[in-house]
Image (cartoon, rainbow, N blue to C red):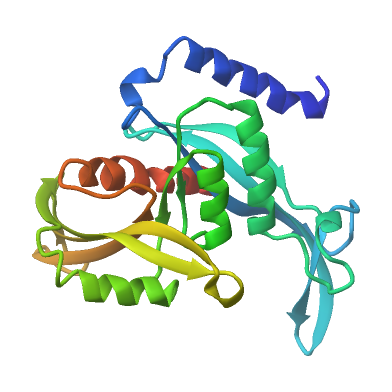
Amino acid sequence: IEVDEIEGALMGAVRKLIKNKKFSRYLVGNHYTVAIDGTQKFKRDTIWAEECSEREVKDGNNTRTQYHVNVLEANLVFPNGMSLPLMSEFSNYAQGDTETKKQDCELKAFKRLAKRLKKAFPRLSIMLVLDGLYPNGPVMEVCRKNRWDFMIVLQDKSLSSVWEEFEGLKKLQTENRFFMNWGNRRQDFQWVNHIEYAYGPNGRKKQIIHMVICRETWQEVAKDSAESETKKSRHVWISDKPLSKENVHKRCNLCARHRWSIESGILV
């Protein structure tokens, strides 16, 4: 088989599974959850293909040029932990700006991958789950143009204006709170809906987004003793759709958290 045909064969198999409704019991809100993440495949000190990206690395007191290849992966992920490869987009030196020495990057590859994904599945109900690199206006534009739902990780230092709105509005939206047990974890969800996010030149462009924080605690046996200790974690996402007590568990626990399935696959 020709290398370029391998992905086509895979896509044909996935389309058949979808058409025969093999995944219907694993859908959340009637959406197929698609996780997207990038990884470096390998690196060498010699250039083996013109598409390679390059970088300068320190070698003692000297620096040398290293060549590497990155790939952006899209996987179908489901609440039962299953993760199926769907589509790949490789970095390409020619896609960068050689005059300014700005190389191809994950966000540029995302736009190419999104275009191919929409073409391959034009009518499929999709929810994208993305990591902390992606909470920005252009990515949201792509999702909404394609009519895709999304849950995107929001880091503490990203979208400062959205954080400010959240801190101010949460005092007014005190009813937006939900507590539940999930597995061995006690979860506390707090969210704010309808936050206006301005971006672009002079903030002319705007997106309405929704933000949720999940704080959780659980008991775990300490590594250095046999005693139990309390562990804590916090997760933050921005959502395409408004959050409520009825959907916050599904969107966060059954969809957004399963972005980690693609990371596990990449590590393997």
Q: How many marks?
A: 0
In the rendered view, tell whether residue 42 sits above or below residue 173.
above
Percent of width and height locating residue 208: 40, 58
Horizontal side of residue 1 vs 172, given as left or right = right
Question: Residue at 52% across / 46% down in the picture?
Answer: 143
* Residue occupying the far front of the picture: 204
- Can residue 264 be seen in the rendering of this structure? yes
Question: Residue at 37% across / 70% down in the picture?
Answer: 162
Closest to the observer, 198 or 16? 198
Question: Residue at 89% across / 51% down in the picture?
Answer: 49
Closest to the observer, 47 or 167? 167
Percent of width and height locating residue 170: 19, 69
Closest to the observer, 85 or 237? 237
Quadrant in which residue 218 is drawn? bottom left
In the rendered view, tell whether residue 108 sits above or below residue 31.
below
Percent of width and height locating residue 142: 57, 48
Horizontal side of residue 119 vs 56, given as left or right = left
Question: Residue at 61% across / 53% down in the picture?
Answer: 39
Closest to the observer, 158 or 148? 148
Percent of width and height locating residue 176: 15, 58
* Residue occupying the far bottom of the picture: 61
In the rendered view, tell whether residue 209 sits above or below residue 71.
below
- Can residue 268 be seen in the rendering of this structure? no
Horizontal side of residue 44 vs 132, given as left or right = right
Quadrant of the rendering where the N terminus is positioned? top right
